[in-house]
Amino acid sequence: MSEPQSNAKPADLMKADAWQFEYRQKCSPQTSNLDLLTYGTYRVAARSSSGELFHRCDEAILFCLGAAPLLVEVAGSRYALSYYDTIYIPLATPYRIVNESSDEGLMAVCRAPAENRHSVFHAVWQEVRVNEQRIRHLDGKDVFLMFDVTEEADKLLVGYTIYEPFTRAWPPHNHTDQEEIYIFTQGRGAMEVYAEEKTKTFVQSMGTLDAATIPVLNYHPVFSQEETLHFIWCLAGARYWVGDKHKEFMDASVDELTT
């Protein structure tokens, strides 16, 4: 006679150091001199996923920064993100991150308060990097507009900047109506953040996944060293890129620029 079938399922053991999904907040308006931006990272273990994520008062942008491709489920659709791809998450819109690969996944997330709900926007790096309409060429560096003024949002604007070796930012510039976070993603370099030369106290070496906040009215030049340097810039506030608004930034005809 066969044994009766049991509907019971086996237990799982979670050791103290086990994890599947993790959020690490790096800074927020409560812990920095920024008024709007919050920055953090998501880690997603292999063949795992997050639960539902939700920012009740914020719009957000996710950046895929690991080797593992990730899926983002939002607004009834699934978006595949590979390295350097981004996705804009509208205000108060639930989403989930899924990792179907055998490698750990990594995403950065920047968010800012919003009042209006806009459309999801997925930017594919391999397309943006060859689209001249989204590239601004400067001396020794290129700027790639991943989430531009042509996309609707309340406050966020996002791009990548890639420096050739031994390149510096010129002219130094600051903003009266934008704050920023720089997140370094490849190479090593240096960065200064200062309101005026004589009070220049933030002079730092920057390595991969180091980041810096840039409060309003601070100049923020970057310097590359012996290798190519990549960084994300995410700004919140008035929605323009400095070089599109001020030709002096593009032709370096001034020693410094306030925007």
Image: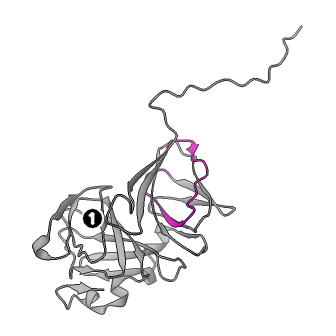
Position of 145 compared to 188: left or right?
A: right
Disc 1 marks which residue? 229
Residue situated furthest top in the rendering: 1
Q: Which color scheme did the rendering employ for the protein?
A: one colour
Which amino acid, by three-letter code, is at mark 1?
A: Leu
Question: Where does the image place residue 77, in percent across and percent down from the top left?
Answer: 67, 62
Residue situated furthest right in the rendering: 1
Q: Quadrant of residue 240?
A: bottom left
Segment colored magenta: 44-68
Please count the marks in the image: 1
Position of 216 compared to 149: left or right?
A: left
Residue 10 on the magenta segment: no
- Picture residue at 20% right of the left edge, 91% below the top: 253
Question: Where does the image place residue 140, in percent across and percent down from the top left?
Answer: 24, 76
Residue situated furthest front in the rendering: 30
Quadrant occupied by the N terminus: top right
Q: Residues within 10 Å of mark 1 (few under 14, many from 20)?
A: many
Main SS, magenta region, reads loop
> Closer to the camera, 194 or 88?
194
Quadrant occupied by the C terminus: bottom left
> Closer to the camera, 135 or 205?
205
Q: Tag 1, which secondary structure?
A: strand
Residue 60 on the magenta segment: yes
> Closer to the camera, 196 or 77?
196
Question: Where does the image place residue 217, in percent across and percent down from the top left?
Answer: 27, 78
- Picture residue at 25% right of the left edge, 90% below the top: 251
- Picture residue at 48% right of the left edge, 43% below the top: 103
Question: Where does the image place residue 149, in percent across and percent down from the top left?
Answer: 48, 82
Position of 14 compared to 258: left or right?
A: right
